[in-house]
Amino acid sequence: DVKVTQSSRYLVKRTGEKVFLECVQDMDHENMFWYRQDPGLGLRLIYFSYDVKMKEKGDIPEGYSVSREKKERFSLILESASTNQTSMYLCATSTGAEAFFGQGTRLTVV
Amino acid sequence: AQKITQTQPGMFVQEKEAVTLDCTYDTSDPSYGLFWYKQPSSGEMIFLIYQGSYDQQNATEGRYSLNFQKARKSANLVISASQLGDSAMYFCAMSPRRGATNKLIFGTGTLLAVQP
């Protein structure tokens, strides 16, 4: 079974902090994604990566950056956390015909 | 630009009845994949069904079937014989294909409540 693991289930951070959300997959998938999920807005794509050190902006990249130094790990970085970044963050990996999700990280910025 | 539209924010269905969840999409790519996911209150995303744009037959997986109408750009999910455990949020998604890059985009979701 494919496993996608996010480093934290719940996080509380202060405004202005630098926040790292980590995602690790145990399959050899090229494509990895970061989404945020908010009520009524569905899943919105923040960034995705189709290979090591390769990344593309999604629909809402502002305030975020990403890092993919190894194929299995894709990190989402909030350079200076703000209260409007309070949300559920989901990492996914894809073969093209199926996507596999982590359990999600509920981030609260206070 | 690619877009997925789910126009039903919420729906009710009686247990054991069939229900259709609507999904329309917009893309200029000739090759793409369509997906449905279920998200129960626990938050996990559960893959239900996949349809490729060149597939001739509608996809089916147990009680789930995808009513694919390419000319109308619709990919509705049909759940037959609803069960109480089907109560969840359902998301339609699309993956336009450009070489090796499969960007996956989602609709806003439909919350399904199955009534006994």
Image (spheres, rainbow, N blue to C red):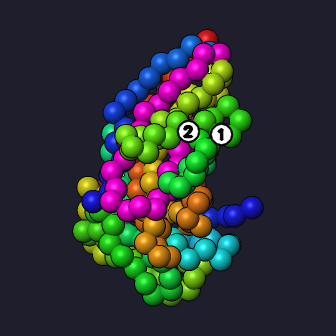
Please report, as a chain letter, where disc 2 is located.
B
Local secondary structure at mark 1: strand
Magenta span of residues: B16-43
> Visible in this render: residue A52?
yes
Q: Position of residue A15 (x, y in %)?
A: 27, 64
The quarter of the image holding the N terminus of chain B is: bottom left
Q: Amino acid at mark 2?
A: Leu
> What residue did someone put label 2 on?
B66
Q: Amino acid at mark 1?
A: Thr
Among the 4 quarters of the image, the one containing residue A57:
bottom left
> What residue did someone put label 1 on?
B60
Between residue A74 and residue B58, name the one nearer to us. Answer: B58
Q: Check whether the beta carbons of the residues at disc 2 and disc 1 lie within 8 A of each other.
A: yes
Above or below residue B12? Residue B106 is: below
- Magenta-span inclusion, residue B28: yes
Please report, as a chain letter, where disc 1 is located.
B
Q: Position of residue A64 (x, y in %)?
A: 31, 71
